[in-house]
Amino acid sequence: MAPASKDLFDDSTMSFGEHLEALRVHLWKALIGVFIGVVFALFQGSAIIGIVRGPIDRALVNYSEEDVHDDTEALQNIDFWQKAKRYFSEQFSTDALFDGDEKTDPGKTEADVPEVSSAPVSDTIRVAINAGELGEALHGVDPKAYPAPPEEARTVSLNLNLSAPEFRQFKLTAERARQVVALNVQEPFLTYLKVSMISGLVLASPWVFYQLWMFVAAGLFPHERKYVYLYGTVSGVLFLVGVVFCFYLVFPFVLKFLLGFNKLIGVHPQIRLSEWISFAVTLPLLFGVSFQLPLVMLFLERLSILSVNDFRDKRRMAILVIAILSMLLTPADPISMLMMMAPLVLLYEMGIGLCLLSPPKSPFG
């Protein structure tokens, strides 16, 4: 009696040479997809670099807008924990959570907030002058033509536009102080190529994995393919969540904290473009990989290496290992360490739940 279910590849036999030929075909298809992705990224390289530069550009603008503290006093009173406590109290206030790094200023309008822009820079600046002091100055020059100003004039502020060619250079200098820098002539070009290559690989990655899957699927049974679809999708979602979490939540906190120490010790930051690109690519990648923790736990449980009770009993040791890995995988600052450690602890608990909810039969064997 014929079996009810029949594997798709039961009637097909492939020699070693035919396997190599199939591998060659899928490999060429994957490479063509990567080439198309890289070419597309080359034409969109400026937009992609703008996205990658976004966190550091915003951090530098906010850094330049903060009040300047006394550098001499800061050098004499460097207290790390006091600095960290003040930072957390500022960041986790209601205004900071909803408004990001910008602080509310009743006297500042939207037009007064500086932005990193490539628009032409004018030679006009807007200055505020106390009406009483201006009146006294004019009165001192010509008392007959300009009477002494009333006392109420000291409470009035006049906004005047001043124009001079030198002001344009001043504004350009201030604008460039809020941007990343290149230390040699070929660095922007090489960075452009690097970002385009990485972006092309990322864009083509679904097609590449599809070709890899088409080659591997020929050797899998239907129930094995079902689990690959399920856990492969979960893995991809966890990776994307880790990357987005790092890029949009971790970067603002980490950059503000680290740039704050430049002001603390009286150092002006000049962020190198190539180094920032490497940092902005590496850290989200590490977060994406670390967010695979629940699937790693499920894999170990299904191979009978560890059990759910082992995960529960060794919870304290696991948290210690997570803390050590978070310290090693992130920059040397407590903010990024804590922001990797906290979600990993939650993912550890999620992994225990995943082991309990998944069917007892091993999907890997």
Image (cartoon, grey):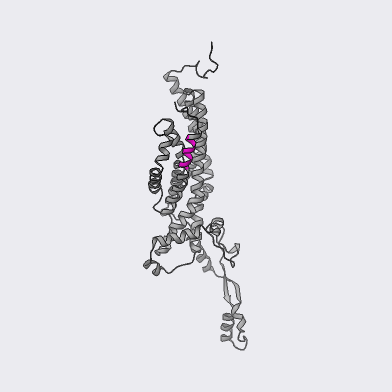
Give above or below for 257 relative to 288.
Answer: below
In reply to whether residue 350 is colored magenta, the answer given is yes
At 56% from the left and 83% from the top, the residue drawn is 137
**Quadrant location, the C terminus:** top left
Q: Nearer the viewer, residue 178 or 32?
A: 178
Give above or below for 54 relative to 83.
Answer: above
- Tell me which secondary structure the magenta stretch mostly adopts: helix
Give above or below for 214 relative to 319.
Answer: above
Residue 253 point in image, percent of width and height: 48, 55
Q: Is residue 274 left or right of residue 7?
A: left
At 52% from the left and 35% from the top, the residue drawn is 233
Residue 5 point in image, percent of width and height: 54, 18
Residue 105 point in image, percent of width and height: 57, 65
Label count reads 0
Residue 189 makes an appearance in the image: no
What residue occupies the far top of the structure in this picture? Answer: 1
Residue 52 point in image, percent of width and height: 50, 49
Give above or below for 336 relative to 361.
Answer: below
Q: The magenta stretch spans which residues?
A: 347-355
Q: Nearer the viewer, residue 262 or 149?
A: 262
Dividing the picture into quadrants, the one containing residue 300 is: top left
At 45% from the left and 57% from the top, the residue drawn is 257
Q: Is residue 307 left or right of residue 114?
A: left
Residue 349 makes an appearance in the image: yes
Dividing the picture into quadrants, the one containing residue 73 is: bottom left
